[in-house]
Image (cartoon, rainbow, N blue to C red):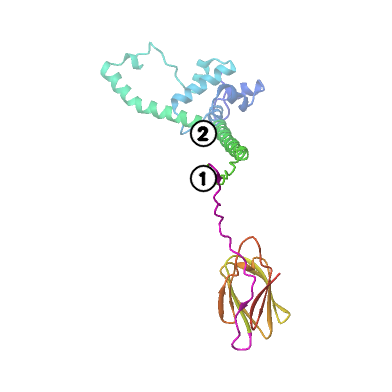
Amino acid sequence: MLTTDNNNKPVILKTTRQAKGLTLEIVHEHTKIPMDALKAIEEGYSLRLLSPFYYRGFIKIYAEFLGLNVAEIFQQYGINEASKSNPSSPASLKPHQSNRKAKTLEPNAFIEHLQEFLSMVFAPKSIKLMLKILGGLLLCFLLFKMVMGLGSLIHKKSAPVHKQIIPRRYVKPVEKNEDETPVEKPVRQPVVPVVKQEPVEAQSENNKVEVAVRAMRNTWVQVKADGKIVYQMTLNKGALDSWSADDRIELSGKNLEQLDMEINGKHIGPLGGGERRIRKVLVTKEGLTVKK
């Protein structure tokens, strides 16, 4: 006897499942039937996106899983089982009629397969699997970038340092006289600029001591005007500055020979260069004196 509820809906699948202590999740795991299709089958209603072909197939799979008679379940759900001897079956139709029906069924079959594919793709398990695959690919990409960056850093640290090759000094060959006596010719030495040590005369015309400088490179300077410090900082390359006093101006610091100087209105240029450096310069109304 068929089992139905008060609304004449078949409930044999649901009651059998509950009697065996199975949940819909367990049935879904074993049969791979979508959860919405399982609920529709148990409650006896159809889904708009679920075609009759798949509805009938899902009922068959569900009944076989529960160990029920498929033909009885079909009868309860009002589904006629196809018979080869049925004269109304597609095989008994005339050739032109069967071909026409096959042509009309092709688009429906395509739509049904498309619906099945979409339901499989957008199933929760499929989405979780795709997210795991994307996360794994992203993790592999990040690890690859880290390994490449670490490798380039190690390569830079282990790269050999090329030492600068200093050429040897050229020595001219020794010439010989007629009596085979070797005569050494003096080697010409490069001219090294010498720091000006002698006083530079630059008389003041307005009874004031005036000094103007332009830095040829960064130079730290301390300036005293009549014994008071009026400037003490680094004069950047290309910078100009000037000071005046009643009696004397004293400059001290580093690289004073790199200052282009003007004393009491007279341009005298830089004081010189070479290995010896100028540390102090005294400027009076008469001119400039380098102090040791």
User: Which quadrant holds the N terminus?
Assistant: top right
**Amino acid type, residue under disc 2 in the picture:** Phe
Residue nearer the viewer, 37 or 184: 184
Q: Residue at x 57, y 82 (%)?
A: 265
Residue 61 falls inside the magenta stretch: no
Q: Would residue 210 be seen by someone viewing this image from the given angle?
A: yes
**Residue 32 at x, y percent in the picture:** 55, 24
Frontmost residue, 136 versus 73 = 136
Q: Main secondary structure of the magenta part?
A: loop
Count of numbered circles on the image: 2
**Residue drawn at 59 percent across, 87 percent down:** 205
Q: Amino acid at mark 1?
A: Glu
Q: Which callout, 2 or 1, points at the residue further toward the start of the chain?
A: 2
Q: Residue furthest left?
A: 96
Circle 2 sits in a helix, a strand or a loop, which is it? loop
Identify which residue is drawn at 55% across, 21% down: 62
SS of the residue at dot 1? strand
Can residue 46 be seen? Answer: no
Image coords of residue 2 (percent x, y) = 55, 20
Tag shown at residue 122 = 2
Range of magenta residues:
180-208
Which labelled disc corresponds to residue 175?
1
Quick one: 227 or 199, which is closer to the camera? 199
Residue 133 in the image: above or below residue 183: above
